[in-house]
Image: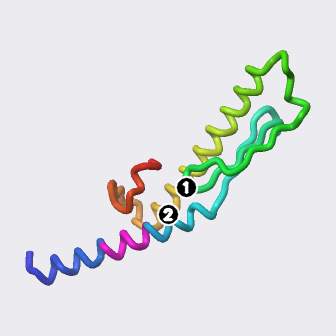
Amino acid sequence: MSKKMLGDIMREAQKLQTEMQRMQEESKKKTVEATAGGGMVTVIANGGGEIISMKIEKDVVNPDDVEMLQDLILAAANEALRRAQEMVNEEMSKLTGGMQMPGLGGLGKFF
């Protein structure tokens, strides 16, 4: 492989990494929502894998059944995080043309 070809490959890889970092920052601004218990618990997460808000309807708060509320919160939070990961994976797939590119841009911490 010639130096020119290697240089071209390195430039393309650097360009891709820059785009991935930009996409990662943009993903933090995008949100997804998930509910549990027929909408009694709502969780919103961002593309950075963070839960950014939660709403609990007071009708579901029962001091004698805290375990049910905990289960609803976990279900909504896990679904929100799953949807956020799916959203980021779709964006990443557009950027890489479907190729798996492990390790680029530090995205492994979320996937």
Residue at 36% across / 71% down in the picture?
Answer: 16
**Camera-nearest residue between 5 and 32:** 32
Q: Quadrant of residue 18?
A: bottom left
Residue at 67% across / 51% down in the picture?
Answer: 52
Direction from residue 1 to residue 14 in the image, left or right: right
Q: Work out which residue is located at the far front of the displayed protein and give it.
A: 63
Q: Quarter of the image for the N terminus: give it.
A: bottom left
- Residue 24 image label: 2
**Magenta segment:** 14-20
Q: Compared to 59, does 21 lie above or below?
A: below
Residue 71 screen position, x and y as percent = 70, 26
Q: Main secondary structure of the magenta part?
A: helix
Disc 1: CA contacts within 10 A as few (<14), some (14-19) or many (>=20): many
Direction from residue 107 to residue 87 in the image, left or right: right
Disc 2: CA contacts within 10 A as few (<14), some (14-19) or many (>=20): some
Q: Amino acid at mark 2?
A: Gln
Q: Compared to 22, does 58 lie above or below?
A: above
Give the SS element for disc 1. loop
Q: Are marks 1 and 2 in contact (CB under 8 Å)?
A: yes
- Residue 57 image label: none
Which is nearer the N-term, disc 1 or disc 2? 2
Q: Compared to 65, does 12 lie above or below?
A: below
- Residue bearing the label numbered 1: 48
